[in-house]
Image (spheres, rainbow, N blue to C red):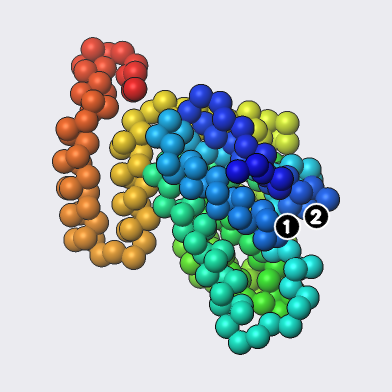
Amino acid sequence: MEYRTIIVEREESVCRVFLNKPESLNALDLEMRAELSDIIEAVRSDPKIKAMIISGKGRAFCAGGDIKSMQQPFKPLDGRKRLKELHRWLTNLIHLPIPVIAAVNGIAAGAGCNLALASDIIIASVDAKFAQSFVKVGLIPDTGGLYFLPRLIGLNRAKELMFTGRMIDAQEAKEIGLVNKVVEADKLLPMASQLAFELANGATNAIALTKRILNLSLNSDLESVLEFEALAQDICFGTEHFIEGRNAFLEKRKPVFK
């Protein structure tokens, strides 16, 4: 597929995806959503890709949904159909068995904010801003925001940001647990790339299983998580990664995972 709204860069085992409609602050129009869906599936199907970075070109990460595409009258269930199509690629992103890093440059509003929340690790530039801006146009938060945000920052904080649509800066986002790191703008992509390569060169089988169980743990009781843990650890004990990690530990050297 030839992409017109995103830029894809592959470097060794890392895939970088840039939203590339800076004139619209990388708003998620139908074409961009289709292209994101395609690249997510391509990454899922490529065993050589071990980590993924999502960022934006221009002065925004993603300004959210494309409001211009919502001018036609909506018939009953049109909105549900629109969201279900969006949910397909969003859940595929969430369930990727590799680490996904959001490198947030500039504005991440509405669905753009929730695209970042659907990632595993969020690194923000000092000029990044986050907003659950749906209420400003008479909508509820979608794209998984109602699920992710309260789990990250707590129910009351999530209510305040979602009820008001208030925009917060990168420092406040870090203070409330919305992002992992805040860095200078010129260090954003180097930092994200460094982390991506570190993870891609790590024990990727263990990372994939850990990610899966962490995601399941949000809706599971302790006994279920312990069972997931036992099954996953049994898998890990049989991998070359464990053998290399164990031997490296005993030999007092850095492991080389392949």
Q: Secondary structure at mark 2?
A: helix
- At 30% across and 37% down in the image, what residue appears? 206
Displayed quadrant of residue 97 = top left
Q: Which residue is mark 1?
A: 27
170 in relation to 7, above or below: below
Q: Is residue 84 left or right of residue 242?
A: right
Q: Is residue 195 among what the camera can see?
A: no
176 in relation to 206, above or below: below
Displayed quadrant of residue 126 = top right
Task: Measuring from the top left, give residue 81's x and y in whole percent.
Answer: 56, 75
Task: Measuring from the top left, give residue 73's x and y in whole percent.
Answer: 74, 83
Q: In the displayed image of the protein, which residue is found farthest to the bottom?
A: 76
Task: Measuring from the top left, give residue 43's x and y in whole percent.
Answer: 48, 41
Q: Is residue 225 left or right of residue 159?
A: left
Crowding at mark 1 (Cα within 10 Å: few <14, some 14-19, many 20+): many
Crowding at mark 2 (Cα within 10 Å: few <14, some 14-19, many 20+): some
Q: Which label sits on residue 142?
A: none
Give the residue type at disc 2.
Answer: Ser
Q: Secondary structure at mark 1?
A: loop
Q: Is residue 168 left or right of residue 100?
A: right
Displayed quadrant of residue 184 = top right
Task: Measuring from the top left, give residue 177's x and y in whole percent.
Answer: 54, 53
Which residue is at the front of the view, 154 or 38?
Answer: 38
Asked if disc 1 and disc 2 are in contact, CB closer than 8 Å, the reply is yes
The alpha-carbon separation of the residues under discs 1 and 2 comes to: 6 Å
In which quadrant of the rendered image does the C terminus lie? Answer: top left
Q: Which residue is mark 2?
A: 24
Which residue is at the front of the view, 89 or 169?
Answer: 89
Give the residue type at disc 1.
Answer: Ala
